Amino acid sequence: MKRILHVFLAVAVLAGAGWAYRSWHVLQVAAKTNQFNEDVDNLFYALQQYKERIGGYPVGNNAEVAQSLLGKNPKNLIILVGRKKDLNSKGEIVDPWGTPLRIYFSGEGVLVRSAGPNKRFDDSTVLNSDDYYRSN
């Protein structure tokens, strides 16, 4: 009887630990998702300000876009000064998980893509893709 009780307690402790870890993980992802949305809102605002003041969206890759927003543009105008943690060592704008964002410009629109929690850009063949997309 004691043995059954010990097994039951061990299973209960493991189940509780699993539930606690899963709950913590869900909260972490939710917090970072909220941070991503806030950061992208700020980036869209900065890109719109850049377009209005410079005459068009910045061109180039992520690092070149970041440099343009930080003053390396025809008018030497600083549009966006992000938090230091928002840029990696290459000067690229990164998502809350530390992966460089992919920024696409098309006419009047901007698309920002994040690799999400797994830090890998998934394609359409992945069933459980965790990438995030936002457009203005």
Image: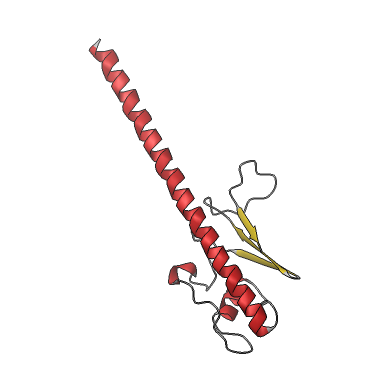
Q: Residue at x 52, y 62 (%)?
A: 38
* Rendered position, 49 above or below 88: below
Tell me which corner region of the image, top left, top right, bottom left or bottom right, holds residue 18: top left
Query: Is residue 105 rendered to the left or right of residue 5?
Result: right
Q: Position of residue 54 (x, y in %)?
A: 66, 84
Q: Position of residue 133 (x, y in %)?
A: 63, 56
Residue at screen point 62% across, 79% down: 50
Q: For this rendering, which residue is in front, 127 or 78?
A: 78
The residue positioned farthest toward the top in the image shown: 1
The location of residue 131, given as percent across then percent down, is 60, 52
Give the quadrant of residue 56.
Answer: bottom right
Above or below, 93 against 80 in this view is: above
Q: Number of marks in the image?
A: 0
Which quadrant is home to the N terminus?
A: top left
Rendered position, 111 above or below 10? below
Q: Quadrant of the C terminus?
A: bottom right
Say if residue 54 shows up in the picture: yes
Pinpoint residue 64: horizontal percent, then vertical percent: 61, 77
127 or 112: nearer the viewer: 112
Judge left or right: residue 78 versus residue 11: right
